[in-house]
C-alpha cells in the first residue's frame, strides 16, 4: 500500500514530459514543412517576375509587383525584395538598361533576395531568425514590351 501511495500522480508527470516533447516535435515538423512551402512559393515568385520582365518594358514597376503577388503564405514579400537585372550575352549585368541600347539585353535575371521567413511560433522567430536563400530565375529576353501590331501586352 505504501508503494502505491508513492506512485500516485506519476503517470501524470510522465505524460506531461512525453507530451511536451511530442508537441515540440509536431510543431517542428509543421514549421519545416511550412518553410519548404514558402521556399517553393518564393521560387515561383522569381519565375513569375522573370516571365513578366521578358515581355514588359525595361524597368517597368509591374515586374516587381507581379513577382511580389499578394499571397497569404508570404505576406511580407514586397517589391524591395525583388531584384531585376538585365544581362548581356556574356551574362554580365548592364549598367542602366534604360540608357543603353536595348539590343545589348540578352537575358533577364530576377531574384528574390533577403526574405526573412516568419515562423508560425512568434518567439521562435526571435530566437532563430531565418533568412531564406536567394531564389533566382534567368530567362532569355523576348519582346521587352515592344508588341507586334495588334498584340496584347501583359503590362
Image (tube, rainbow, N blue to C red):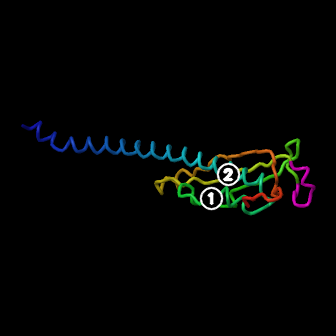
Q: Which residues are magenta?
A: 95-105
The answer to whether 78 is drawn above or below residue 41 in the figure is below
Q: Quadrant of the N terminus?
A: top left
Quarter of the image where one finds residue 16: top left
- x then y, percent, for residue 100: 92, 57
Res 108 label = none
102 falls in the magenta region: yes
Q: Is residue 5 left or right of residue 70?
A: left
Residue furthest left in the image: 1
Secondary structure, mark 1, is: loop
Secondary structure, mark 2, is: helix
The answer to whether 72 is drawn above or below residue 31 in the figure is below
150 falls in the magenta region: no
Going 75% across and 59% down the picture, which residue do you hit? Answer: 153
Count residues near mark 2 (Cα–Cα under 10 Å), then give few for <14, some for 14-19, many for 20+.
many
Q: Is residue 100 left or right of residue 25?
A: right
Task: Identify the residue under disc 1.
Answer: 69
Res 48 label = 2
Q: Evaluate if marks 1 and 2 touch, with contact meaning CB atoms under 8 Å apart.
A: yes
Q: Quadrant of the C terminus?
A: bottom right
Going 55% across and 44% down the picture, which residue do you hit? Answer: 36
Q: Main secondary structure of the magenta part?
A: loop
Residue furthest right in the image: 101
Going 65% across and 61% down the picture, which residue do you hit? Answer: 78
Amino acid at each position: 500500500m505504501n508503494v502505491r501511495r508513492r506512485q500516485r500522480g506519476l503517470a501524470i508527470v510522465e505524460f506531461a514530459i512525453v507530451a511536451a516533447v511530442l508537441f515540440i516535435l509536431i510543431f517542428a515538423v509543421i514549421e519545416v514543412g511550412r518553410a519548404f512551402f514558402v521556399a517553393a512559393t518564393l521560387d515561383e515568385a522569381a519565375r513569375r517576375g522573370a516571365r513578366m520582365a521578358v515581355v514588359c518594358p525595361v524597368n517597368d514597376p509591374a515586374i516587381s509587383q507581379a513577382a511580389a503577388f499578394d499571397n497569404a503564405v508570404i505576406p511580407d514579400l514586397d517589391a524591395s525584395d525583388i531584384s531585376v537585372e538585365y544581362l548581356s550575352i556574356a551574362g554580365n549585368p548592364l549598367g542602366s538598361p534604360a540608357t543603353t541600347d536595348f539590343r545589348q539585353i540578352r537575358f533577364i535575371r530576377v531574384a528574390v533576395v533577403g526574405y526573412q521567413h516568419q515562423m508560425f511560433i512568434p518567439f521562435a522567430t526571435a530566437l532563430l531568425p531565418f533568412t531564406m536563400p536567394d531564389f533566382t530565375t534567368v530567362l532569355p529576353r523576348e519582346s521587352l514590351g515592344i508588341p507586334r501590331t495588334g498584340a496584347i501586352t501583359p503590362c
